[in-house]
Image (tube, grey):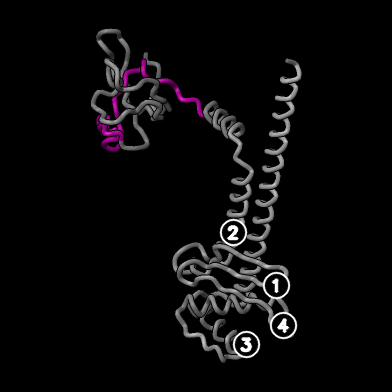
Amino acid sequence: MGKFKIGDKVIVTEHNDNMTKPCASSNKDVFNLIGTICNVHYSDWVDGSTSYGVKFEKDIGGHDCAENCKFGYGQYINEKYLKLYDEKKSEDKTMQKEKHEKKPLEQQIKEKYESKRNVLNARIGFTGGHEQTLVPKKVYHDSMTSTIAIDFGDVVGKIKAKPIANDKYDPSVAFNIIAAKAIYKRFSFPFESDMSSFEAKITAKYLLHKNSGIALDKYVKYLKNMVQIFLHEDAELEKAEQIRKNQKAKNRIRKERQKQRRQNRK
């Protein structure tokens, strides 16, 4: 009786570049590939071992194992080149590897905030296509002058807004201005500079709702949240950079002290 039964998950334990290659008719190396036993082929007349038809998850340039799998995905392999695949053990190894291969702090921060931006984009409906042109790519903020600039990329470009001296509107109105201008540019609609704030807002609201089905106030709130995410990310990255610099300085001082101690012993 052979080592395996049909349906067993196995892994190939040898390369195919030696004299007794496990897959003579395959044009791809199946070493370390995981497959499923789909049929028993024959017993080797030399050593009495059995070969099995193995079905792989991708085309390895093989055959169909006597119509037991999709053509190109199968291969007959001697049992001595196969080992039962332990999924639990493999998962444990992967988890251990991920645990030890800790990502740099800057990368962790970027991935965290990228995930938050993706959630906001999905929530408002900007998951792809032309609406990506209304998604902020980078944010600039000057707290001293309350200036906000949002870069939307190539189509819309960079849009800046800030309260003018003695103007009655507060900094939050800047988001309405940016939203309106972004919508005008996105839909190639001429912006009349002598429009009143109310006229500009009504037109932008119409364009956004007509083309994207999104209310203007929802888009303005989205922009505010996006800006906060970008600013928080910048603050965390700046903090991480300072930590890195401090650690570098500490390491330099420690090395200098170690060098001094060695010299004193002489």
The residue tagged 2 is 117
Q: Quadrant of the C terminus?
A: top right
Q: Are marks 3 and 4 in contact (CB under 8 Å)?
A: no
Q: Residue at x 36, y 15 (%)?
A: 80
Q: Is residue 10 left or right of residue 20?
A: right
**Residue that label 3 marks:** 197
Vertical placement of residue 201 versus 130, above or below = below
Q: Position of residue 104 (x, y in %)?
A: 61, 41
Q: CA distance from mark 1 to mark 3?
A: 19 Å
**Quarter of image, res 246:** top right
Q: Earlier in the sequence, mark 2 or mark 3?
A: 2
- Residue 62 within the magenta-colored segment of the rendering: yes
> Could you tell me which secondary element the residue under label 1 belongs to?
loop
Task: Give the SS element for disc 4.
Answer: loop
Left or right of residue 98: residue 55: left
Residue 257 x %, y %: 74, 28
Amino acid under label 2? Arg
Nearer the observer, 65 or 207: 207
Q: Nearer the viewer, mark 2 or mark 1?
A: 1
Q: Nearer the viewer, residue 194 or 124?
A: 194
Discs 1, 3 touching: Cβ within 8 Å? no
Report the residue marked by disc 1.
Answer: 146
At which x and y percent is residue 255? 69, 29
Task: First in sequence, mark 1 or 4: give its number.
Answer: 1
Helix, strand or loop at disc 3? helix
What label does residue 165 carry, if any? Answer: 4
